[in-house]
Image: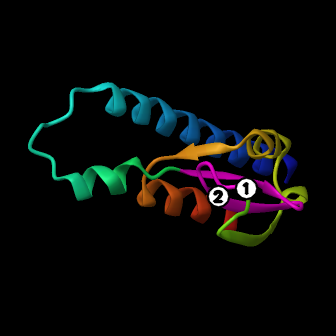
């Protein structure tokens, strides 16, 4: 049973690392000048998924208080995920945020 949890935790951490690498490479690509200002404003909003009072929470980047706190306790997660959430996971899209929350909250 421990091997299953460890394997699942490693898989989740690996997926998150891959998402970060893809996100960095996409952010470094040249931007299309025909992009509307509204679209650029929405895409510039970033989130940080991290620990807050012992639970997984979502912050808007630059804000001190979370806009969403989940019922998932860090104690329920593998140690690798706990370390990652203590430093924070930066997320740049709503889709990525939903995916990460699905991973931790399901």
Which stretch is magenta?
Answer: 47-64
Residue 71 percent coordinates (x, y): 78, 74
Residue 42 showing in the rendered view: yes
Please give the name of the residue rendered at 65% of the width and 40% of the height, measured from the top-left corner.
13
Q: Which quadrant is home to the N terminus?
A: bottom right
Q: Which quadrant would residue 95 be assigned to in this image?
A: bottom left
Instruction: Kindly identify which residue carries mark 2.
Output: 59
> In this rendering, would 72 be left or right of 68?
right
Looking at the rendered image, the disc whose residue lies closer to the viewer, 1 or 2, is 1
Using the image, tell me which numbered label, if any, was put on residue 64: 1
Residue 8 percent coordinates (x, y): 69, 48
Please give the name of the residue rendered at 25% of the width and 55% of the height, measured from the top-left corner.
39
Please give the name of the residue rendered at 25% of the width and 58% of the height, measured from the top-left corner.
38
69 up-or-down from 24: above or below: below
The span from disc 1 to disc 2 (Cα, nearest Å) is 8 Å
Discs 1, 2 touching: Cβ within 8 Å: yes
Residue 106 showing in the rendered view: no
| Label 2 environment density (alpha carbons within 10 Å; few <14, some 14–19, many ≥20) | many
Instruction: Name the magenta segment's main secondary structure.
Output: strand
Under circle 1, the secondary element is loop
38 up-or-down from 70: above or below: above
- Label tally: 2
Q: Which quadrant would residue 88 be assigned to in this image?
A: top right
Residue 53 percent coordinates (x, y): 88, 62
| Label 1 environment density (alpha carbons within 10 Å; few <14, some 14–19, many ≥20) | few
């Amino acid at each position: 049973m421990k091997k299953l949890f460890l394997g699942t935790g490693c898989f989740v951490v690996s997926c998150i690392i891959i998402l970060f690498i893809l996100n960095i490479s996409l952010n470094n690509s040249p931007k299309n000048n025909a992009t509307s200002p509204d679209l650029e404003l929405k895409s510039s909003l970033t989130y940080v998924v991290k620990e807050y009072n012992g639970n997984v929470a979502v912050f808007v980047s630059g804000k001190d208080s979370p806009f969403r706190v989940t019922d998932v306790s860090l104690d329920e997660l593998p140690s690798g995920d706990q370390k990652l959430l203590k430093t924070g996971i930066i997320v740049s899209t709503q889709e990525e945020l939903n995916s990460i929350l699905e991973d931790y909250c399901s």
